Image (spheres, helix red, strand yellow):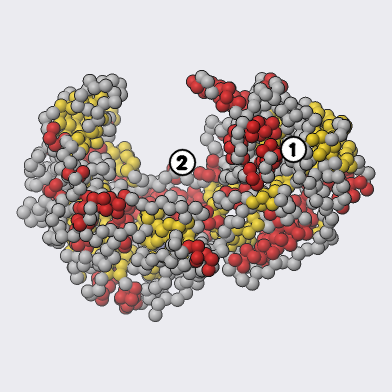
Amino acid sequence: MTQSNRLNQGGRIDRSRRLSFTFNGQQYMGFAGDTLASALLANGVDVVNRSFKYSRPRGITAAGPEEPNAIVQLGATEAAQVPNVRATQQALYDGLVARGTNGWPSVQRDVMSWVGKLGGGFMPPGFYYKTFMAPASMWMTYEKFIRKGAGLGRSPSEADPDIYDHFNQHCDVLVIGSGPAGLTAALSAARAGARVILCDEQEEMGGSLLDSRESIDGAPASAWAEQAVAELAGLDNVTLLPRTTANGYHDHNFVTLHERRTEHLADTAAAAGREGEVRARLHRVRAGRVVLASGSHERPLVYANNDVPGNLVAGAVSVYIRRYGVVPGQRLVLSTNNDHAYRAALDWQEAGREVVAVVDSRAKPDGDLAKQARDAGIRVITGSAVMEATGNQRVSGAKVVAIDTERFVVTGKVETLECDTIASSGGYSPVVHLASHTGKRPQWRDDLLGFVPGEVKGMHVAGGAHGVYALGEALADGAGVGAEAARAAGFEEAAAIAVPDVEVRHESPTSALYQVPHEKPPLRAPKQFVDLQNDVTAAAVELATREGFESIEHVKRYTALGFGTDQGKLGNINGMAIAARCLNRSIPDVGTTVFRPNYTPVSFGAIVGRHCRDLFDPERYTALHQWHVENGAEFEDVGQWKRPWYFPRRVNGKRETMHEAVARECLAVRRGVGILDASTLGKIDIQGPDAREFLGRVYTNKWAKLAPGRVRYGLMCKDDGMLMDDGTTSCLGENHFLMTTTTGGAAGVLEWLELWHQTEWPELQVYFGSVTDHWATMTVTGPDARKLMSEVTDIDLDREQFKFMDWKEGKVAGVPARVFRISFTGELAFEINVQANYAMHVWKALFAHGEKYDLTPYGTETMHVLRAEKGLIIAGQDTDGSVTPEDLGMHWAVGYDKPFSWIGQRALTRPDTAREDRKQLVGLKPKDPKVVLEEGAQIVLDPEQKIPMTMMGHVTSSYYSPVLESGFALAVLKGGRNRMGETVYLPMSDGSVHQAEVVSTVFIDPKGERQNV
Amino acid sequence: MFHIFCPYCQEYREEEEFHPSGQAHLVRPADPASVSDDEWGDYLFFRDNPRGIHHEMWVHRLGCRKFFNITRDTTSYEILETYRMGEQPSITAANAEVRREQGVQTADGGWQTVGAQPENSRLNEETPS
Amino acid sequence: MSEAHSEASVGNAATFDTHPGADAGVTPESPLQWSRVQGHVTEEGGAAEQIRVVERPFLGHLVLRGGAITLDEAVRAELGVSLPGKPLGLVLDAEGSRSVQWVSPDEWLVIVPAGEEFELENRLRARLGDAHFAIVNVGGGQTLLELSGEKARELLMKSVVYDVHEHGLPVGKAVGTVFAKTSVVLRRPTEARFELVVRRSFADYCVRWLRDAGREYGLRVESASP
Ligand SMILES: [Zn+2]
């Protein structure tokens, strides 16, 4: 196919670089500098999609992000699939493959087309709700069919080969949009020395200057734009971001920009010869000031069959002619209510194609452009509008009629003009989307017939974004606003740049016209589309108002107006105007919709950035990680830590199961000696003369008399009396303590201590510091622990010299160490702390000496079994924020008579915390020893009771004990301590019911003799 | 994404460095044993949820680790001031309108102006003598 | 370095020399040991890249807590530099090998060459006497990464939320901030160099992040021998 609509000259494309691309399976040629849309138009491709709901053929309508129809699925390979790309925003590259997003199985002819051919009443608003609601169970079936028919793009089924990232940007002034106002704003701010970021969503900076007919300083506007961009590019304090869409405007001038880095070059960065580079980048910009120079979108007029391919917004016609050298048809009819749109007719005629007529809704358009058109011999029909387009796959004519906009009626006879293109312009809507993201509603301006951005702190609006449309005025506005923004950002000397010279053009005022009246009543007339992407018609909006939806917010939800990726760019104002007319109210009176981020679709890759694959979440390693890996550990995630879970061995050529490994590890500790990497325990250094007093306030038990060299277990509650964390704290010196916390509680406990110190008791002289990472901790435990330790340390290990709950200082394997005689296994145990950089040396030395004792490394699973056999809790597993120390049977760890009202004390004296039927920690022994109860399983007393059964508690920890040769569990049970010996029942989801006996929480060595040897 | 002036670090920092810590100016009863269960319950659980001016405690978790207070408008998310622990807010629901009218507060585009000092990139040129 | 490791209690706090001494034959492992095994870190030197990341392992890291005036006097006497009294200040001694950094109004981070920290702590404690202060040795828990090269700033923009431009982070400034999904202390000791103080357990994550983020510029991670 040839580029039949391509002009021989003109445009900003590079005719020396021919690019081949494929659309809907057909191969075409375009040029470097084309968008996919301009290339399709150049090749005379009329139908690019089927519409969402009615499956009507659709063509390209606009030239920018407001394009509602030409939404394509991009990608030559499965892995490179990208849905929801607007053809108008996608730069053409060699080998580009795209297809229309909607329309299954083909755009040209599809099985859904019957839907569109049926009368307008067939699918009214609310159609899906009304029709497919019953029976409810069928909705899934209907939806599948509808979605497949409608098509919403699809995600790739293979991994994305590209990489993405985030950039944290900070600037004094962020200028959004590089049209005339954006460029002068950036220049004013930049020349004042401000750090400026200028972003623009298009391939090339310059905005409307690139397709302008006007001159600046006597040269084409585009030349001035090039020169301004060049100046900015040369300044160190300016960051230029072309191809970058400002997609979200968040609190306190935080703006997210989405930059396409290689998407304009090829399917993947690698295919573009830029292996390793990022495909798209999300800039997270914190701006001192934001200059919103986002310009405006031209509104199409709403008339019958305004969706047939060949209907375009007027400005897009000029863009395609002047920027891409493409005339999207042969014979043009222009329907307008304003002067500016006349340039489409002038451009068309200058391109050598026929302008059939300009149809102007105004009685006496006498602006300069209108005069110019008349002088050029163009027929201008006044007081009229295009009422209806004819044609099916392409416009074949325009029905023109005189109208009375006040009374909303046609007043004359219909004349049909033969044409293949209808351009329409209903005026301009400032792009208020970004400002609206902040929650500030746009404000209606009657003089502009449009909404302008609401006032946002730190934001300045320039140019078309607040209705300053004339070129000279926009340049001047931007220059002033840029300087104002720079001054507000602290550059007090900032001044507006001298505004270049632009000829002032006389324009006659725009008339208020949104929907063109039809000779038939609205519900009978052919469809008049308001929102092309969501297939919302004027009749649908009218029907919604008749059905009682009075607020535009409700109309929107009922009709889907402005939904999805469209966000109402072309249709919102027209929809509101129609609703206002039907309700006989003003546009601002029916409200305005809130636009939400993102302005245009953003790829998931850019949102994720580098936070994926092995960098999805930090993995924290202990100093012994390498050893664990090399010794075959299976790892468990504990918070962000990677902790050895168990160490399976090969036995008779077979790798142990977890059950086998854990049983072996448990027995090794109970009968010989085992070792655990406990480095992940939180450790907090506490110093100061009031350290002891502070401990007494944050722990439930007493600390006044703990002597240097001694260790104590403590419970920490919140002020509601519920357990929060637990651990041991050692007295290192009279005013110096080392607190340990649970692995998961480390950061939270430190902040908790700071909170109380900083906010409640700042008078206490105490400091806290995290030493979690500083110390590596190894627990050597089991009956042989002393024998092993005696080979590697100079510390006197005599049981009288070094008692249970003592700590000593000395050397272990030649490394200075603090050794703590505390036990989480119930066995004799030594917890060794050494500076982490020396941990591997000590660990390996222990294994060198431990071989003869079969020193067995064990992981968290064995640790859990061993501690549960002893009834030792894990805060956060056996407790859940509703469990008091009393509930745990830890009365002994609560100092009710301490002088200060420590955290939790008051709550523990409430009647509720003294209730006898609170859930209390108990042991459960399954009647069938082979059963390991499910953690979380609910406990009932009567298994025959009808559902809902009375739930008495639940299992908190449950394991198999190789020592007991039975499953066993810890549980919380209402009034549990008074139920010792009772049988309880645990109904499972498969209908089976387990039985268990309520027993003590301590399953092994109830007197604690084994650890005290 | 708030931009929060840390009154200790003396500059604006990104919200990600901070963590909210609930309502500010809660007073723990001096003698908890002497208050009723109801009063204790109020202290523990009952919090204001105003539309408009709210005083909140935040912590500069990844920065200086200090707790401080923020006066924030819950409708606009505007932070009107930040101030150190132990200080009282200069803007309250009672005086906010007056202060706005006086132009004392909520300066255009600056978000936290009371207690806040302008960012100063030359902060570290001097050291104490 | 003192061979003795017995409890040297100055005042009522316990001090502790964590080092075994040179003659003990104990080889320390830096927090990047596992990264090295994984091939993420090479020895110092080698082909020039646009960004160099060099680990300075085993340095002495002490956290000082207390009042600025009290601590300033002691620090000046023992280290010869003033305590940065203004927020976010970072000062270096004449050699550039010892630094004091403002962390919060009552907290400073002191980094000194390997093995100096225990003696320094004892001298500071002796000088501070009965004042209310705290000194915590955290040297095993963190390591220092130096970043240099023309693209170092871009690399940091990908990694930290703080403004790393000259205006935000001039020489002599240091901040605690967000790095990827963890936190670091970010320092600007000289014109040519940024520093990251990273926690030991997060060091591998940080290095993998830097390597990934720096791939498009060319980046080497090296570890300096002490
Ligand atoms: Zn701070």
* Left or right: where C84 falls relative to A294: left
Q: Is label 2 or label 1 in front?
A: 1
Residue shown at the point (28%, 20%) measured from the top left: A991
Relative image position of residue A126 (x, y in whole percent): 60, 28
Binning the other alpha carbons within 10 Å of mark 1 as few (below 14), some (14 to 19) or many (20 upward) gives: many
Ligand 1: image quarter = bottom left
Residue shown at the point (84%, 59%) measured from the top left: A503
The amino acid beneath tag 1 is Gln
Relative image position of residue A405 (x, y in whole percent): 79, 40
The amino acid beneath tag 2 is Arg
* Left or right: where A501 falls relative to A142: right
Image position of A616 with respect to C189: above or below:
above
- Please give the residue where the numbered disc 1 appears in the rendered image: A515
Question: Is A927 in front, or is A959?
Answer: A927
Question: Is B60 in front, or is A820?
Answer: B60
Query: First in sequence: mark 2 or mark 1?
Result: 1
Binning the other alpha carbons within 10 Å of mark 2 as few (below 14), some (14 to 19) or many (20 upward) gives: few
In the rendered structure, find residue A979 and report the number of the disc placed on it. none
Residue lying at the far left of the rendered structure: A800
- Please give the residue where the numbered disc 2 appears in the rendered image: A613
Image position of A28 with respect to C124: above or below:
above
Question: Is A378 in front, or is A59?
Answer: A378
- Residue C95: image quadrant is bottom left
Asked whether mark 2 and ligand 1 are closer than 8 Å, the reply comes as no
